[in-house]
Image: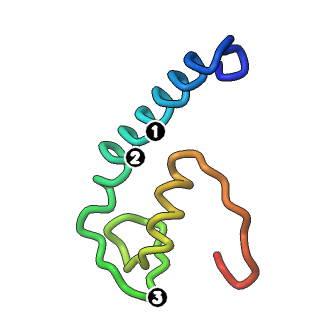
Amino acid sequence: MLRNASNELLKDSVIKLSRDYIFDKIANEIFVYWFGTPSNFYGQTRIPRQGTIACGYFVTGVLSDAGFNFPKKNGHK
């Protein structure tokens, strides 16, 4: 859709709609599963409400669940 946008105004509109859609899905459909999951500096759970989760794992996990891909680093799950 973005590639087919014929001008900057249309491209900006596509980007805004996409950003709003992703934000809505993360805020209203993914975050809610994590409510009640305890935070811990070393937490690494990928299962909401089971175990503990560190803030970095939470952020990358939520974004991964939203469809973003991150390269795996040595020593991390």
Q: How busy is the neighbourhood of tag 3: few (under 14 within 10 Å), some, or many (20 plus)? A: few
Tag 1: residue type? Ile
Residue at the extreme left: 36
Residue 26 place in picture, x, y as percent: 40, 46
Q: Quadrant of residue 55?
A: bottom left
Query: Taking 36 as reference, is 57 left or right?
Result: right
Report the amino acid beneath label 3: Tyr
Distance (Cα) linking label 1 and label 2: 6 Å
Question: Which SS class for mark 1?
Answer: helix
Residue 50 in which image quadrant: bottom left
Measured Cα–Cα span from mark 3 to mark 1: 28 Å
Residue 39 picture quarter: bottom left
Please say if 70 is above or below 40: above
Q: Which of the two discs, 3 and 1, labels the residue nearer the N terminus?
A: 1
Q: Which mark is residue 26?
A: 2
What numbered label is drawn on residue 14? Answer: none
> Answer yes or no: do the residues labelled 1 and 2 have beta carbons within 8 Å?
yes
Q: Residue furthest bottom?
A: 42
Which secondary structure, mark 2? helix
Q: Are marks 3 and 2 in contact (CB under 8 Å)?
A: no
Q: Residue at x 47, y 64 (%)?
A: 59
Residue at x-position 32% and y-position 61% = 34
Q: Looking at this rendering, what residue extends furthest in the right direction?
A: 74
- For the point 62% across and 21% down, the residue is 8
Query: Which mark is nearer the camera, 3 or 1?
Result: 1
Q: Which mark is residue 22?
A: 1
Marker disc for residue 42: 3
**Residue 65 drawn above or below residue 11:** below
Pick the front one: 51 or 41: 41
Question: The C terminus lies in which quarter of the figure?
Answer: bottom right
